[in-house]
Image (spheres, grey):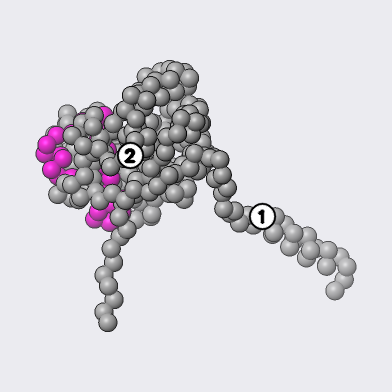
Amino acid sequence: MPNLARRVLLAVALCTLMAAPALAMPQDCTGKLGTSRVLEVDPVGLQVGTKHFPQTLDLADKEVVLTFDDGPHPGTTPAVLKALARECVHATFFTIGRNAAAHPDLVRLILAEGHTLGHHSMTHPMTLADIPYDKAVTEIEKGFRADEKAAYGSAGVRPRVAFFRFPGFGSTPELLDYLKQRGIGVFGADFWAGDWNPMTPEEQLHLVMARLEHEHRGIILFHDTRDQTARMLPLFLAALREKGYRVVHVVPPPVQTAAAPH
């Protein structure tokens, strides 16, 4: 083979190797906060979060579940995901269907990084309790379908992860019963960062840590659409690690498949 042709082939091969994606290396979580355990939760009949329901998840002292509402948002969700990844922490994201449809790449990134994908209606009306029942049901179901299509490319009769959080926690007995009949679990919260109110990341950190020190455990509500939360999160995760708190990752039971005939 002429030298020129050989050099051209070698250059093409090198370019191909450089363009190929690098193989993902296992992350070293030594010294990180980490996810202490995975809690499998059956969604059927589930109603948890003491701000609105009598009971919460089965959490030990100093165990917390991190949840994020209203995303995905390209300006802030990636920063939230990076902060969680740096500390080897997994959370639950309750996404708005409209945002999921607009940013399916971020929905798939949430899943690819091992987080749980929950649902938060199609357009986040304030609140579902303040609109007619049939319109509220349509809002919920459209959100399921939009989230599912963004995440998996298709939507079935029931969402793959049957976890739902009401926008603004505005539920009614009729809507709660509807979700219960559909086998959809409802998440409230035990406390929140109040990050819908403008404040500095330092002020927000002080507020949420004070509430956590009072409660000692629970489901915490954040919003991955808030810049102050994205900036506060690394400080918060460091504070959890320093004070001996542990993060619990909530997941649904595995999908049951029919056993093959013998």
Based on the displayed image, in which of its 4 quarters is residue 7 positioned? bottom right
- Whether residue 252 is visible, yes or no, is yes
Q: Is residue 234 located in the magenta-colored stretch of the structure?
A: no
| Element assignment for label 1 | helix
- Whether residue 105 is visible, yes or no, is no
- Could you tell whether 242 is left or right of 21 in the image? left
- What residue is at 37 percent from the left and 34 percent from the top? 62
Circle 1 Cα neighbour tier, 10 Å, few/some/many (<14 / 14–19 / ≥20)? few
Chain-order first, disc 2 or disc 1: 1
Q: What's the amino acid at mark 1?
A: Ala
Q: Which residue is mark 2?
A: 60
Q: Write down the region rendered in magenta.
A: 156-179
> Is residue 196 positioned above or below 167 on the image?
above
Of the residues tagged 2 and 1, which is closer to the observer?
2
- What residue is at 49 percent from the left and 39 percent from the top? 33
Residue 97 in the image, given as x and y percentages of width and height: 33, 41
Q: Which residue is mark 1?
A: 19
**259 or 93, which is in the foreground?**
259
Residue 39 in the image, given as x and y percentages of width and height: 34, 48
